Amino acid sequence: MNLELANTLSLWQWLILGLVPPATVALYFLKLKRRPVEVPSTYLWHRSIEDLHVNTLWQRLRNNLLLFLQLAVVALGMLAVLQPGWRTHVSPGKHVIFLIDRSASMQAADVSPSRLEQAKRQALAEVDQMASGEVGMVIAFSDTAEVRQSFTDSRAELRRAIEGIQPSGRSTSVLEALRVASGLANPSTSGDVDVSQPAALYIFSDGNFDPVTGFALGNLDPVYRPVGLPESENVGIVAMNVRRHESRPDELQAFVRLQNFGSRQAQGDLTLEVDGRAVDYTRFAIAPGESHAVVFNLGVLSSGVLHAHAAAGDVFALDDEAWVAINRPRRTRVLLVTPGNPDLQRGLTTSAVQEIAELTLADPASLEDEAFVQKMATGQFDLVIYDRCGPKQMPQANTLFIGRIPPSGGWEQQERQSVPQIIDIDVSHPLMEWLDLGDVDVVEATPLRVPPGGRILVDSNRGPLLAISPREGFEDLVLAFPLLDHSAEKGMIYATNWVVRRSFPLFVFNVVSYLGGRRLSGAGESYLAGQQVTIESPVPGKTLTVQTPSGHEIALPETTGGKFTFQNTDELGVYTVFSGGEVVHRFAVNLFNAAESDTRVKPRIEIGQTTVAGQAAPRTTRRGIWKLLLIGGLAILLLEWYIYNRRVAV
Amino acid sequence: MSTSSRLLSPELLSQLERLELVSRKVFRGRMKGERRSRRKGQSVEFADFRSYVPGDDLRFIDWNTYARLERLFLKLFLEEEDLHFYALVDASPSMDFGQPTKFHFARQLAAALGFIGLVRGDRVRIETLGTPPGRAAPVFRGRTSLWRMLDHLEGLRPQEQVSLAEGAKRFCVRNSGKGIVVLLSDLMDKAGYEGALRYLLAQDFDIYMVHILSAEEIEPDLQGDLRLIDCEDHDVAEITVTAALLQRYQQTLSAFVAKAREFCVRRGIAYFLARNDMPVERVITGYLRERGLVQG
């Protein structure tokens, strides 16, 4: 509160007014021309006034209280003419709802120390201005809304609620917060507090959200308090991902896309670190509003944490960094249900396959076992291979059927055909990569009728021999001929020479690699802030602990099926999952939100049909005190009159 | 008795007739008066005996005693003589203040006391301090002199510019005899009153000091910023009347009065503070009677 003066008089009026104090003093001295009174003798009077020394000027002034009082009256009058006053906040109303944006963009440091802190300060200032009897409510919002404090008239509670708001890396959506506010401001749903009166809705935000549609403010009186500078330069990483190299699948490439949200050309350095070690760096120069993509070749990399850091010296640090966690691929769990097939087992136990998969063997008889069926229904395996047998219900896994077709999904077998000739191979499919089936002969086959959406991988002159078809998120691969056949006379006989060909172990590897899910993983895992992350436990039944980027450890509650859901992804950075003290998984949470990276403060926001212009300063009114001054002057005048009379009366 | 005098009312006169002046000292009157003196003398009132010594008047020998005791005794009679009564009035301009004026009050008191003296056959002389040395005021004696005395008093004017000490000195020079002196003054003399009283003391007068102050002096009715002008020497005192100043004035006045009283009492002077608005009869029959100046 600063004292303000409003000059209401012109110069010559001031000059006239300025003459009043000297005139008062002059009148005082004129008044001192004392009234002559003849007395019998001044003898006693002289002796009485000897000590009083009333004749010196200073003594006169000092002793003349009346003069001072008169001058005080004049001074107060002059001050009143100046109309002194203070800018004070307009009382927001009986009910105040504070919406405080804690989305990622509120961490921009264009105002010190950050927009969120600034917003909290402004909100606290409003709380301080609240008169007694006024009730307030605090809602913090990002993409979700959180009622930090319901309606209360306790300023301490409101302060505590506001001070406790922590920043998040989430995006912004004000709609939910508005709905919460509206719901609480609705008399029919409010509790103790009667909020039938209009409630003031203070929105402390940078306005980085889309216009709110489909919402009526009703009796909410919105006040938008923009926090931050309207023009702020920012370059942010809006995307980063890791992919396998197009031509060299063993190698990885990191793609980083930068965007300039400022109004000037931005320059800077982009550094890429792997596990804290800088591996590459590039300079960039981006025109205003443009984006720029950078590709880093990572080479062969099985696991690690990629960290990209753009140094452009802007106000918003959150989007200058991006992480991608590359996890070592989990070994594929393969179940082989077979009455006995040494060649297939040999193919599944090559060193290359063993590296990526672990094999479980089962007897076809176990398909009748209820517990076993239940186990497969919960997704314990990534790939189930049915060798000359089949389940009654399809498992929650990818499947390979050898010499049989799945019981559902529209698969059909044709007539048994002898010696079909392979005439076409779909080499574009990953399963068929590097396969040469020219030297493969098949004794007998039951060519397939592939269901719609299926894809024929190996075709023969008799019909499709190998086909793949999607099923509810899984894929079923069907081989139309068995590898071994059982003959009553000869016992076990080969039904094909493929098992002795070079292409067979390669095919098995492709099957395990592709249907085991290896192809899908391997690229970096990255999530957006606030996104739900599903973590699979490598060892079912064991609890997991997640360490956030800031070092907090969160134990995940156990769930069935070995899948855990993690939701506390407010923080940006790399999250590490521990199981029994060992790192089992890592994932990164990034901003990657162009709306949040666009840190320019919006001058106005739109809520429903209402456009709310930002008010940088608190709503203030001028509280003049000239009336008080005049009343004070009058009081002094009365005091002067009283003193005068009292002196005269004694 | 006429009632035309402004100084003495008939009622007062009738009251005063019963009174007489009393001196605390033994004085020799110049003429026989109606007063019993403490001196033994020729009156009809027996006082004492004493042994005869040659040369005594044979007429006063008590022959009866001689017959019985064969020794000569002389009969002593109380002497009846007159008393010298002086009223010394301060006629300075400062006495011309108050309602009635202090001077009027002084004249009333002088007239009343003078009347008592006249009734008792005393020698009454009323003078002002400023009376020139060579021109003494007339002496009044006997009831018949009342009108002359009152005329004399009426003729006095408070216009004399003479200090207390000078006036007292002149008085002493003119009047060498013993007697009662009643000094009627406000004692407002910047040179002090002590000298005047010392002159009178030196003459061995029986002195009565009647200190007359006006009500305005005792309780000043002043307001505001004033320029006080002394009526005698035109001295100026600028004051701003405040409660503090008035309180201080009261203290000064009390100290002044107390000092005068102490000075008088120490020297055997009967001191009496009078206000100008006091009734004269109350002063005479009350205070002066208590002080022993009058009796009856």
Image (cartoon, rainbow, N blue to C red):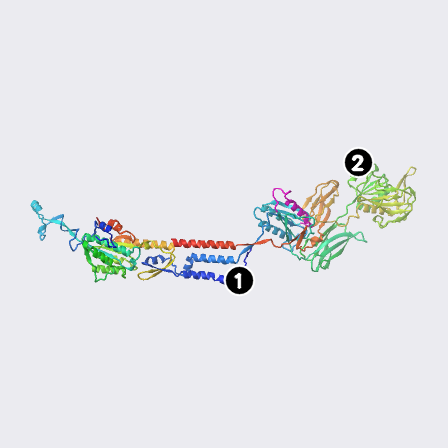
Viewer-proximal residue among A531 and A225: A225
Mark toward the start of the polypeptide (1 vs 2) = 1
Q: Gap in Å between the C-alphas at discs 1 and 2?
A: 102 Å
Q: Is residue A396 magenta?
A: no
In the image, what residue type sits under mark 1?
A: Ser
In the image, what residue type sits under mark 2?
A: Glu
Q: What element carries label 2?
A: helix
Viewer-proximal residue among A385 and A396: A396
> Is residue A57 among what the camera can see?
no
- Labels 1 and 2 within one chain: yes
- Judge whether B46 appears above or below A230 on screen: above
**Is B203 displayed left or right of A384 in the figure?**
left
Q: Residue at x 8, y 51 (%)?
A: B58
Q: What element carries label 1?
A: loop
- Judge whether B199 appears above or below A147 on screen: below
**Is A449 displayed left or right of A108 in the figure?**
right
**Is B132 displayed left or right of A469 in the figure?**
left
Q: Where is residue A489 in the image (x, y as percent from the top left)?
A: 92, 37
Sort mark 2 into few (<14), some (14-19) or many (20+) by Cα contacts within 10 Å.
few
Q: Mark 2 lies on which chain?
A: A
Residue indicated by mark 1 = A10
The image quarter in which residue A400 lies: top right
What secondary structure prevails in the magenta region?
Answer: loop
> Is residue A46 among what the camera can see?
yes
Q: Which chain carries label 1?
A: A
Quadrant that contains the N terminus of chain A: bottom right
Q: Nearer the viewer, mark 1 or mark 2?
A: 1
Instruction: Write the start and end of the magenta stretch as one range.
Output: A168-197
Q: Where is residue A595 in the image (x, y as percent from the top left)?
A: 70, 53
Residue indicated by mark 2 = A370
Q: Which residue is drawn at 43% across and 57% down?
A: A66
